[in-house]
Amino acid sequence: MKTFPPPQRCFWPIGTIKGWVGPTGFSSKSTPEDVLKDIDLSNRLVIVTGANSGIGKETALAAFKHQAHVIFACRNIAEASKITKELNSLLPKDSEPRAYAYELDLSSLESVHKFCLKVRSNFNALHVLVNNAGVMGGDKFERTVDGHEQMFQVNYLAHAMIVRELFPLMRKAVGGARVVSVSSHVHFFTHRKGIDFSKVTGANAHVKSDTARSYGTSKLAQIIFTRDMQALSAASRRAFESEILFFSVHPGAIQTPGAKKHENGWKGRLLRKLSKPFIKTVEEGASTTCFAAFHEDATFFAGYYLADCNFFQSSKHSRDRSLREQLREVTEKLITDFTETVM
Ligand SMILES: NC(=O)c1ccc[n+]([C@@H]2O[C@H](COP(=O)([O-])OP(=O)(O)OC[C@H]3O[C@@H](n4cnc5c(N)ncnc54)[C@H](OP(=O)(O)O)[C@@H]3O)[C@@H](O)[C@H]2O)c1
């Protein structure tokens, strides 16, 4: 396995703006095509949540182009079906379809559970899960049908539940499996304690608060989860045939429909101004996800946070052991509480 020195301290933000090439040989300007050059994903199953739009769609298209079987896990099933139909029509005549549209609404744990049951009944192994779908800020606080703050559930909790329910399939993936969570540099911007658990679930989950901080909290939870799962997975590696690697990534600043919603109000407008020099194309925005999900060299960074296809030091909160334990405890409780209602 190759080893990589961390990028120079001055790499961000200038390196991102200028497109400097980092130790992995990739940069903010790399595209999924650069990252996936000569990589064949035949016979691999890849799931991308929120694949009907933006970064998720670009990631799913890149995997499909490189011969993977791809599940487009989407709330907007009409759009997902349209995309998968078009993709399958490009395949040689008589070949089996390789793009599948599955319905998934992350704001309902019941929908998540049904989605996982469907995947488990149709496939024997899962090679890559990309936890991409996300709600970004906005000006309104919402609570899900399960009673949790919407961003916490959609961006983090529901994806944690998918990992839990599809774990057995990942364990059967020949050559190992990977889980990539699309997080954000906004994870540096959270509540003072990192995660204020009284605001993500329970009676106060809908109380008006700073939506940007709540978005940051949900993205922080993804990074903590990645580190925790990687540690647990590595510790139990010998007991299983295949290894599961976990990554979290920052895709960059990309003008997708979700990001535009985030630009409401004066804070949003300020953010748009500040992020202008960093803006990437949607393609460039998918390359760090593709690097983590498919590139051999990414194995060196398992458990870590990546940006511009290179290592990036995540926040202090993301490395806080006691916060990690608290998050694990709360997550397990919330998922178990739900599971008990459907059993
Ligand atoms: N764009 C950026 O600058 C930026 C920066 C940092 C991180 N990110 C992260 O990148 C990821 C992808 O975002 P994007 O920029 O590509 O935005 P996008 O084009 O708006 O994509 C977001 C996706 O998430 C889906 N989604 C939202 N709520 C859902 C739910 N309840 N159930 C299932 N799917 C749901 C959306 O589905 P619908 O089409 O049905 O709404 C859409 O497919 C997000 O996790 C975001 O936080 C983006």
Image: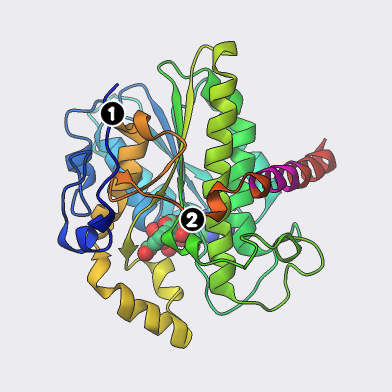
Q: Quadrant of ligand 1?
A: bottom left
The residue under label 2 is 315
80 and 133: which one is in front?
133
Q: Residues within 10 Å of mark 2 (few under 14, many from 20)?
A: some
Q: Amino acid at mark 2?
A: Ser
Q: Residues within 10 Å of mark 1 (few under 14, many from 20)?
A: few
Residue appearing at x 46%, y 74% in the figure: 262
- Secondary structure beneath dot 2 equals loop
The answer to which quarter of the image holds residue 176 is top left
Q: Is residue 16 above or below residue 7?
A: below
Q: How many marks?
A: 2
Query: Main structural element of the magenta stretch: helix, strand or loop?
Result: helix
In the image, which residues are magenta? 324-332
Residue appearing at x 23%, y 59% in the figure: 16
Q: Which mark is residue 3?
A: 1
Q: Amino acid at mark 1?
A: Thr
Q: Position of residue 326 (x, y in %)?
A: 71, 47
The answer to which quarter of the image holds residue 117 is top right
Q: Position of residue 204 (x, y in %)?
A: 78, 70
Residue appearing at x 54%, y 20% in the figure: 171
